[in-house]
Amino acid sequence: MYLVSRLSPLLLTVLLSLLLTGCPGPSSDNGEEKSESSEKSESTDGTPPEILLEPFDAPKLADLDANVEWEKQPVLDSMDLLRERQSKEKQLISVADALKLKNTNQEINEKILSALGRLPENDEEVNWGATINRHVGADMKSTNPIMGSSAVEFEVSSLTGFGLFSFDWNFIPFAVSDTVVSWQSSKDKLYDKVVLRDDLTWSDGVPITAHDIVFTFQTIMNPKVPVPAVRSGTDQIRWIQAYDDQTLVFFHKEALPTNVWNLNFPIIPKHIYEKELKTDPTLQDSEYHVKHENNPVTGGPYELEERVRGQEIVLRRRDSWYMHDGKEVRRRPYFERVRLRIIQDPNTALLALKKGQIDEMALNPELWKTQTENDDFYKNCTKANGLEWVYFYFGWNCKTLFFEDKRVRQAMSYAFNHDEMLKELCYGLYQPCTGVYHETAWMSPKPMTKPYKQDLTKAENLLDDAGWIDHDGDGIRDKEFDGKFIPFQFTIMTTTRPLSLSICTLLKENLEQIGILCDVKPTEFTVMQEKSRKHQYQAMFAGWGTGTDPDTSVNLWKTDAGRNYGQYSNPEVDKLFEEGRREFDKDKRAKIYGKIHQILYEDQPYTWLYFRNSFYGFNKDLRGYVFSPRGPYGYGPGFGSLWKPVSK
């Protein structure tokens, strides 16, 4: 079992997609790629207040048990869940036949996945000494799991760290049997009690206990520790109490159906970090912390073996993860080593895939359609795809004079040639997006909102109604503000990725037809993140992944929320999000979030463009890839189901 970070649900999915597309997404998350979780412990500019954790006098466990009605919750093994699912699924063709196919349509794609996506029938099939060479688009900054703020950092911590909770491909949560004996929730939803296994150890041999979880929680909530990514969501927990080495109780601030998504966060070893936390709360500056940064103590299936900055990160399977007192107490990870090859350029990465230097990589539409269809690719590789709820959009800064009027934002959506983008730039591989929730999601509106189509007449009429008219006859629309006519000329920022630039250039060309000037500004990714957070932009091309719960997007749309980069505000949306996070009936919640989707569609703070499905290239030796709405990773078991067969 691999850690599915609480940061994963929206954030991690998005961060992973950003490495592939170069579009800015959330900088933290609770629930994944949560779009975000909540912001109650942050000010509107994202800076933490002086006190994040109020003093709390936890009751005795005996008193708690006497007064609380506990309800048993599931403790599961995600590999068992997947094996049970696959036992009911028909394998459409043999592995040998699947490896001969070229993936040219969805029928063939399903055949390939039905054969190559399966778990091994028995241990004898597995090459236990194998190395998997994974592709990542950037290096990591920190090996400390709570310091993570990028996709590659969360990927590494998912392998070197451990978690108490996970969720399956349907976003159904459960406690992880690798680490948890039992999980109970109080009937009033204010408490969760977890009993840890007693056979867990850190890589240095020290036992993992409930006190490590409490220490980590308090460290994350220390305002002097710079961990905004993992703090989001964790800050919704009132307190965590360790009653002994194995027993934990989570105390929630209020009864909410979203509380379960806040329970899982990366864990660090108390015996390592408590020694210099007070003298160096940055966890990174002192000589002591640098030593542990370079040689981290890990609690998960893998430990750091080697790191060549800018080139690769090599992880080694940790025997003490699955062995205890000479017995195998957990599943042995399928790979002896995981090598993460850092290759920024997609074309260079594809060449490495063809040569067998990496075993997997995500493919953009151009690579899928034009460079992976010949015998040169299929000699050593195959490819597969699946549905993924990652959407991309033009984001309008609603507090600029250009985009404060929703009629203008609607005009932008009508002006853009969506069909040309989908058919030409995206090679017909992506489906149109109309809002925050995918049509297959339980919370999507019924009926679903319809995709915008280019209609320049409607765009011009809306602009006219909003007062943007060419008053001086120079061919450019303008509008009077404080006695001065301002021409409609704005800048959209994007990264230097070819697809991003092409889409923004198409927008520029479309807007020129109706008297608007749009300057496309290629921007370095970290600069985009900073400008987004500070609202220092007029428009941007960006992307978000999916959270495990619809509430995770509140941080994108709530008035003054820290990741509401476009400064959108609608009191009705704020009210509906508050109602949704307090409603336990799923059908009623679905109607609430469907209404939010419809309002956002009407207001068009984004011009929603497309859902980016998962398209991957795999080495023919790789097996066990299974897609979910978050792609092949970032859920349970995700990466854990990948394996290589014994060579014949």
Image: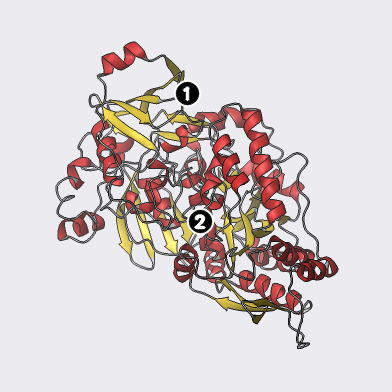
Q: Measure the alpha-carbon separation of dots 2 and 1.
A: 29 Å
Please identify the quarter of the rendering in which residue 279 is found.
Answer: bottom left
The answer to whether 125 is drawn above or below residue 477 in the figure is: above
Determine which of the numbered discs, if any, sits on residue 350 in the image.
none
Please identify the quarter of the rendering in which residue 407 is found.
Answer: bottom right
Instruction: Pick whichever of labels 2 and 1 is earlier in the sequence.
Output: 2
The answer to whether 269 is drawn above or below residue 589 in the figure is: below
Residue 459: give x, y in percent of width and height: 79, 67
Determine which of the numbered discs, if any, sits on residue 74 in the image.
1
Q: Which residue is mark 2?
A: 16
Q: Mark 2 belongs to which amino acid?
A: Leu
Q: Residue at x 70, y 52 (%)?
A: 601
Please identify the quarter of the rendering in which residue 375 is found.
Answer: bottom right
Residue 557: give x, y in percent of width and height: 56, 51
Q: Mark 1 belongs to which amino acid?
A: Pro
Q: Is residue 299 visible?
A: yes
Q: How is the image coloured?
A: secondary structure
Q: Secondary structure at mark 1?
A: loop
Q: Residue at x 33, y 26 (%)?
A: 249
Q: Is residue 459 left or right of residue 110?
A: right
Q: Is residue 600 left or right of residue 20?
A: right
